[in-house]
Image (cartoon, grey):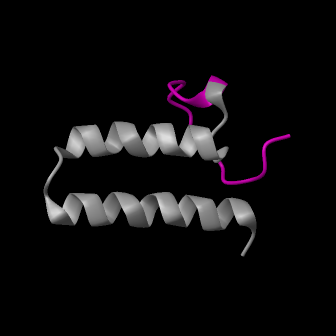
Amino acid sequence: MTQDQTLAFAVLAGMMVVVIRGRLRYDLVAVLALLASVITGCIQHVDTYSGRPASLSPVT
């Protein structure tokens, strides 16, 4: 697996753990996962709220 794939799966796994534990609301977890994806570079900042599906390919 590439580093981008590993980061994407780590964000998803972290999101699932937080949702299953139930300590935070699911909408807050979704926003935090989106921010984590932008910070780690899985999603480009210009595509954050574009509504287009993001690919997990490296940012060029």
Q: Residue furthest right?
A: 60
Residue 28 percent coordinates (x, y): 26, 38
Residue 8 percent coordinates (x, y): 57, 59
Indicate whether 2 appears above or below 37: below
Q: Say left or right for 57 vs 24.
A: right
Q: Quadrant of the C terminus?
A: top right
Q: Residue at x 19, y 65 (%)?
A: 20
Question: How many numbered marks appear?
Answer: 0
Q: Residue furthest bottom?
A: 1
Q: Which residues are magenta?
A: 46-60
Q: Nearer the viewer, residue 51 or 26?
A: 26
Residue 51 percent coordinates (x, y): 50, 29
Indicate whether 12 appears above or below 43: below
Q: Say left or right for 31 vs 40.
A: left
Instruction: Place residue 59 in its image quadrant.
Output: top right
Q: Is residue 1 magenta?
A: no
Q: Is residue 51 magenta?
A: yes
Whether residue 53 can be seen here: no
Q: Residue at x 50, y 44 (%)?
A: 36
Which secondary structure class fits the magenta region best? loop
Whether residue 6 can be seen here: yes
Q: Say left or right for 22 vs 54.
A: left
Residue 1 percent coordinates (x, y): 72, 76
